[in-house]
Amino acid sequence: MALFPYPFRKNQQAILATIKKTLHDGNHLIFESGTGSGKTVCALFSTLEYALKNNKKIIYTTRTNAQQRQVIVELRQIRNTIKPTENQILGIGLQGRGNMCLLARNNPEFFKGTSEELSRLCSHEKKKTLVKKAKDQGCKYFRNYKDKPEKVKKIIEWVTKNLPTTEEFIEKCEKQHLCPYEINKILLKEANVVVVPFIYVFDPMIRNMLLDWLGFAEKDLVLIVDEAHNLPDYLRELYSSELSMWMLKNCLIEADKHGDPALGGIGVCVSEFLKLLTEIISDMRDTYIYGVLENGLRREITHKSDAFIPSHELETEILSRFKITSKKLGDIIADLIAYGEKIQEYRQKEGKLPRSYLHKLGVFLEFWTNIEMDQYVKLIVDDTEGRNPRIEAYCLDPSLGAKVIKGFHSSIHMSGTLEPLEEYRDSLGFALDTELVAYPSPFPKNNRRVLYATDVTTRYEEIKQDASIVNRIRQYITLICNDSSHNTMVFFPSFDTLSLFLRKGLRKNINRCLYVEEQGMSQGDLMNVVSSFKQSKTCDNDGAALFSVMGGRISEGMDFPAKELEIAVIVGIPYPKPTARQRGLQNYYEYKFGKGWDYTVMAPTARKLVQSIGRLIRDETDRGVAIILDRRAPRFKKYIPDISESKNLLQDIRRFIK
């Protein structure tokens, strides 16, 4: 405790003691502690002490690269405090190949490759480098790694001394024209802490590769999951799969370029099979989403974007239209995979990304025809107004991907917004006696106020009946943003809602400098927007406003201390859209746990609200006021106990700030 790198905040000693007991007992811990309470340093400090004494390694997994940087910064601070043993502490950050492979970073085509495609590319380039010593063959970064051991040694010494972030490490390697991926493999064997994205732990192929590099088995590893509330959705997406019209079009282009062979020994060529799949998906969209009858008439007028489809409808349609057996369909799928592999090899020899859409199609169909339907739903989805409909096998059960956690010595799951903890425990399949702890905020309650308005809502049915509600919300946003010089952030429930208000002229109403997070904005562009917003308060007395979305990159992983943010406006309640996918998830959780509404609607909505409000307070001196523009806000008093009704928002905001 005496070597802890900072003065203790409230609850930190209790967190350290709880983690220490969890590690000693070889158990799992799920805990919530508010944003800014120092969870990262507590988890690192306590697990490092245990790992050094018991020959364990720590896998610290995060969702974003920004969170990864924070882990390395805290690790440096710990090592600076424990100077007698500083050489024992080495932390390494890993990112995806798209970031760490310099060949991919500097080639627009390679940069977009999947981990599997880049792995194949890397292996091929390394073989060329080793077989042919000519300077123009293979990867120059790998060649320098092999031919210049002294440079590699200096990089390793520099890393050991400085504990760089992944970005700093990659930049250093690029200046020396050395492969950061290969050097990291050497460093990993000596590292006490390895900081990785979720995929390094939860994708089986990538996890096995990481374990090989580490030279450790799962039972000798301690797993830390940061921002753990993101993990269930991440696992659902990881174990889901889809087939879109766009992908089928790319398959047709590929067949046109590389050849159009027959499949499955039935005399049907690739292009015929692709056209049939296109027809089937179009028919399913018309039938299940648009409600079109055989005579072309609509059964009903719908506004839905997805719908359930019978679990075997795709296979049944293929079998009946081609008049083939299930075995022949299996042969067709095998031929697609084999043909796709040949295309991958051909492109690889040409020095291109080893990508084949026909291979992806074969893998998808193999997955689609073999999944267990008690943990999946099959959907037809059209959320692009007919431009790119798709079929989707959506995973309902994240515990499918979380089973690996039980093989680790211990795991620590933490977040500032994890309530209800039982939902997280149940979703990932942990035992009922798993330790669950929620620590209260360590900051003074008087430093924050949360207000809500009673005359507005974003509930669709009410807005449809009363168009003036949208205008009142717009007026509230305008008044709050223009009334003071304090930095103000406005969080919308979705990009669609944000776009709606911009179309209605909200941008013109704001008389201050306004920044807007755009959907699909690159990380670099987003950071420029955030940086400009933060600086506006110090450079301009009028401050600025920033429009963002709940559940996005700004609302979850970014800090806005002191005057960088003092007012947060929450536009509506971010309930999940009532899609077929959402209904399937709710029904599954109701069947499995008897808590469908609580686990799949209330819990994720509350987390988005709390995350957005949490941007306001990051330390003991921060002050801020949040305003929820929705009369339904009291439903979440369990998660936001200090919420209170406001009869006069501007007056209450001014009074709090003064």
Image: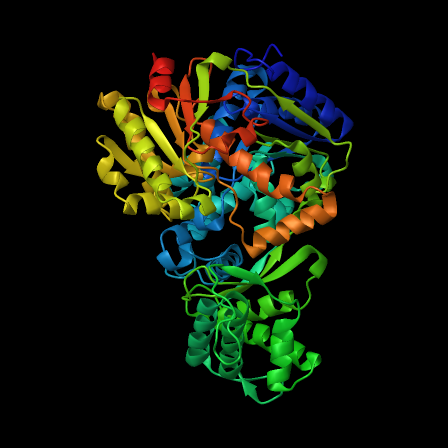
Residue 58 shown left or right of residue 156 in the figure? right
Between 325 and 605, the one nearer to me in the picture: 605
Q: Quadrant of residue 485?
A: top left
- In percent of width and height, residue 610 lies at 51, 30
User: What is the image's colouring?
Assistant: rainbow
Q: Is residue 556 above or below residue 375?
A: above
Between 319 and 238, the one nearer to me in the picture: 319
Between 406 and 649, the one nearer to me in the picture: 649
- In percent of width and height, residue 424 lies at 65, 37
Q: Quadrant of residue 158?
A: top left
How many marks do you count on the picture?
0
Q: Quadrant of the C terminus?
A: top left
Q: Quadrant of the N terminus?
A: top right
Q: Is residue 139 above or below residue 523?
A: below
**Residue furthest bottom as drawn:** 267
Q: Is residue 396 above or below residue 613?
A: below
Can you see residue 206?
no
Residue 419 shown left or right of residue 430 in the figure? left
Q: Is residue 235 above or below residue 73?
A: below
Residue located 37% across and 21% down the image: 648
- In percent of width and height, residue 295 lies at 50, 81
- In percent of width and height, residue 555 lies at 44, 34
Residue located 57% across and 13% down the image: 10
Residue 425 shown left or right of residue 206 in the figure? right
**Residue furthest front as drawn:** 465
Residue located 63% across and 66% down the image: 368
Can you see residue 322?
yes
